[in-house]
Amino acid sequence: MDLILELEDKYFFDWMYSKVSPNYLAQNASDPVRQFISIYLTLTVHGWLLYFSGAGLSWLLFFDKKYLEHPKKLHNQVAREISTTFFSIPVMSVFTSPIFWLEVTADKRARSLADLV
């Protein structure tokens, strides 16, 4: 995750924080708040990309469209499933981000300790 975060900081988040946030977040990539926000946004966007690419390919290639004519199918069921997923991925990212944030900060601490030895 730290490698992905470095790449996204270099190519996207530096620009985003310089436009949107206060000066201290734009200048300090090792700030814990900036790291957490970056990890949260990364997990959310990549979660949406993973879901919609996988679900879209499954819909196009494998899904039997005759199922949509089933009498027990709910009205707008497909749209409801898509909207439920769209709004639940950011919630899942809230609970997953601290784990990745601990991994990123611990890795940086471990590297700094290795440099001292």
Image (cartoon, rainbow, N blue to C red):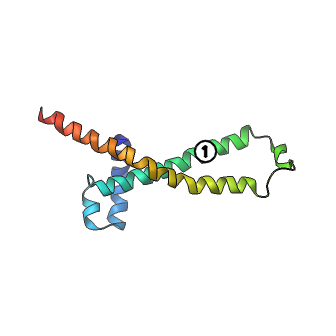
| Place of residue 60 in the rendered image (x, y in percent of width and height, measured from the top left) | 72, 42
Q: Quadrant of residue 13?
A: bottom left
Residue located at (26% from left, 52% from top): 30
Q: Which residue is mark 1?
A: 53
Left or right of 22: which side holds 58? Answer: right
| Place of residue 58 in the rendered image (x, y in percent of width and height, measured from the top left) | 69, 40
Say whether residue 12 is visible: no
Q: Is residue 56 above or below residue 117?
A: below
Q: Give the SS element for disc 1.
A: helix
Residue located at (12% from left, 36% from top): 116
Choose between 104 and 57: the one closer to the eye.
Answer: 104
Residue located at (62% from left, 42% from top): 54
Choose between 57 and 34: the one closer to the eye.
Answer: 34
Left or right of 72: which side holds 28? Answer: left
| Place of residue 33 in the rendered image (x, y in percent of width and height, measured from the top left) | 31, 57
Choose between 21 and 102: the one closer to the eye.
Answer: 102
Task: Name the kind of residue labelled 1 in the image.
Answer: Ser
Q: Residues within 10 Å of mark 1 (few under 14, many from 20)?
A: few
